[in-house]
Image (cartoon, rainbow, N blue to C red):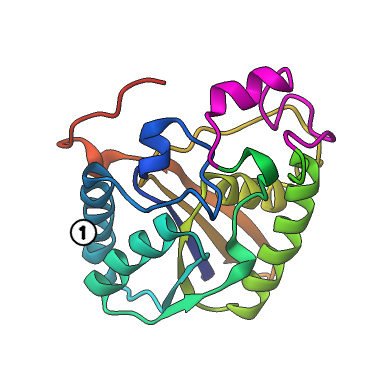
């Protein structure tokens, strides 16, 4: 029996993504036209199963690209929205608004390359972000026990979910792909003996985006 279900929808393409900029709170201006279309397709995909087994709520973090993705899904499914700062992405510090290529060149790689070192003045470290985000997501999961929950999420939140629920040690060099508007699903199962475990049902599912123009490869 599935007792709790978590569905993570990565936000659609944002303008900062299309421009190759670090999309902190100062820089994120929301979705591109393609990003809106991606989010709409994800919403339609979820609406099909919502008719059979309704979702209870959708959560979003504060950045505009998440909020806009959330609004599209919430309007389609007609479910309540919870805005929660615990779902915010990494703190980028002085890198906010800078080209990602320049930021990575300056520190010899992206956040994952040196996970205990900030990638800019005032930024998180990658491991520090994962630790904070894992604590926050644990709280949200506990608060929503027994529900079907959708998260309009950063890619980093998807990685956090896998790190937390798979028990991957903080600092592991392993990673996960996460396309814009992809769907990732975790289910909490309990068997007839009362034994429980989290199971990854799908990761980075983009079948619903097949008719849209593909994004250019970075």
Q: Going 27% across and 79% down the picture, which residue do you hit?
A: 78
Left or right of 30, for residue 208: left
Majority secondary structure of the magenta segment?
Answer: loop
Magenta stretch: includes residue 118: yes
Q: Going 24% across and 44% down the picture, which residue do you hit?
A: 208
Left or right of 197, for residue 147: left
Where residue 167 appears, x then y in whole percent?
Answer: 76, 47
Q: Going 59% across and 22% down the picture, which residue do you hit?
A: 102
The answer, for residue 51, to whether it is visible in the render is no
Q: Which residue reaches farthest right?
A: 116
User: What is the span of residues highlighted in magenta in the rendered image?
Assistant: 97-120
The answer, for residue 117, to whether it is visible in the render is yes
How many circles with numbers are drawn on the protein? 1
Q: Going 53% across and 60% down the picture, which residue do you hit?
A: 187
Residue annotated with mark 1:
44
Left or right of 212, for residue 120: right
In the rendered view of the protein, which quadrant contains the C terminus? top left
Q: Which residue reaches farthest left?
A: 211
Magenta stretch: includes residue 156: no
Where residue 119 appears, x then y in whole percent?
Answer: 73, 33
- Front position in the image: 98 or 157: 98
Where residue 196 appears, x then y in whole percent?
Answer: 67, 64
In the depicted structure, whether residue 83 falls above or below residue 173: below
Q: Quadrant of residue 65?
A: bottom left
**SS for dot 1:** helix
Where residue 121 appears, x then y in whole percent?
Answer: 77, 40
């Amino acid at each position: 029996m599935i007792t709790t279900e978590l569905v993570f929808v990565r936000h659609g393409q944002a303008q900062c993504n299309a421009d190759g900029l670090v999309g902190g709170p100062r820089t994120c201006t929301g979705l591109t036209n393609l990003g809106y279309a991606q989010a709409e397709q994800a919403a339609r995909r979820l609406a099909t199963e919502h008719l059979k087994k309704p979702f209870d709520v959708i959560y979003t973090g504060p950045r505009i690209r998440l909020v806009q993705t959330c609004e599209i899904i919430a309007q389609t499914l007609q479910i309540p929205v919870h805005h929660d700062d615990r779902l915010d992405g990494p703190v980028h510090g002085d890198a906010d608004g800078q080209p990602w290529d320049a930021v990575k060149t300056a520190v010899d790689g992206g956040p994952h390359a040196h996970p205990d070192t900030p990638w800019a003045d005032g930024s998180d470290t990658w491991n520090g972000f994962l630790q904070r985000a894992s604590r926050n997501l644990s709280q949200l999961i506990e608060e929503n026990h027994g529900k079907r929950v959708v998260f309009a999420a950063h890619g980093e939140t998807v990685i956090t979910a896998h790190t937390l629920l798979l028990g991957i040690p903080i600092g592991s060099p392993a990673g996960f792909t996460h396309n814009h508007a992809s769907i990732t699903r975790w289910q909490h199962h309990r068997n007839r003996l009362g034994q429980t475990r989290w199971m990854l049902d799908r990761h980075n599912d983009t079948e619903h985006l097949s008719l849209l123009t593909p994004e250019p490869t970075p």
